[in-house]
Image: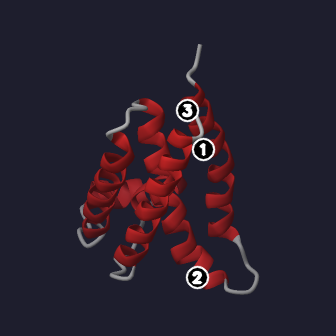
Amino acid sequence: MMRRDRIFALISLILIIPVGFWTKFYQGIGHTWFNNYGGAILYEIFWCLFIFLLRPKREILWQAPIIVFIVTCILELLQLWQNPTLVAIRSTFIGRMLLGTTFVAWDFFYYVIGCLLGGLWLKLLWKNS
């Protein structure tokens, strides 16, 4: 049987995934921010939740946001490298969603926000389970 905290994490993922995709296709007021930065925040939260789902331990509450921040910063820096293999991966929808396509320094700021919110989300999951 699945633990209650894992169930909450799974429900959170089920809710956040479509919202994250929505930010990429939204065309209303503030669409540039949602398309570029709102999705980055949700991307960080998604990975924090995913790590917690795999390993729901107390130490993950602070480790996951740090791991996610480091890995996504590396991925952001990799966008500066136009290796043919990476370019081929980025040419697919999933590749663009996971690896991104263009280096933007502002993304680091939103990664911090996303990881902080992801950490808070994990603490709420832990507290309420």
Location of residue 113 with respect to 127 vertically, above or below: below
Q: Position of residue 28 (x, y in %)?
A: 76, 82
Residue at disc 1, secondary structure: helix
Mark 2, mark 1: which one is toward the viewer?
1
Give yes or no for contact between labels 2 and 1 (Cβ–Cβ under 8 Å). no
The kind of residue tagged 1 is Leu
Rounded to the nearest angstrom, the CA distance separating label 1 from label 3 is: 12 Å
In the image shown, does 116 or 81 lie closer to the viewer? 116
The kind of residue tagged 3 is Asp
In the image shown, does 85 or 126 lie closer to the viewer? 126
Residue at disc 2, secondary structure: helix
**Residue 33 marker:** 2
Residue at disc 3, secondary structure: helix
Give yes or no for contact between labels 1 and 3 (Cβ–Cβ under 8 Å). no
Q: Position of residue 71 (x, y in %)?
A: 29, 55
Q: Residue at x 42, y 59 (%)?
A: 90
**Residue 78 marker:** none
Give the mark nearest the N terminus, 2 or 1: 1
Rounded to the nearest angstrom, the CA distance separating label 3 from label 2 is: 32 Å
**Residue 5 marker:** 3
What is the crowding at mark 3: few (fewer than 14 residues within 10 Å), some, or many (at least 20)?
many
In the image shown, does 79 or 86 lie closer to the viewer? 79
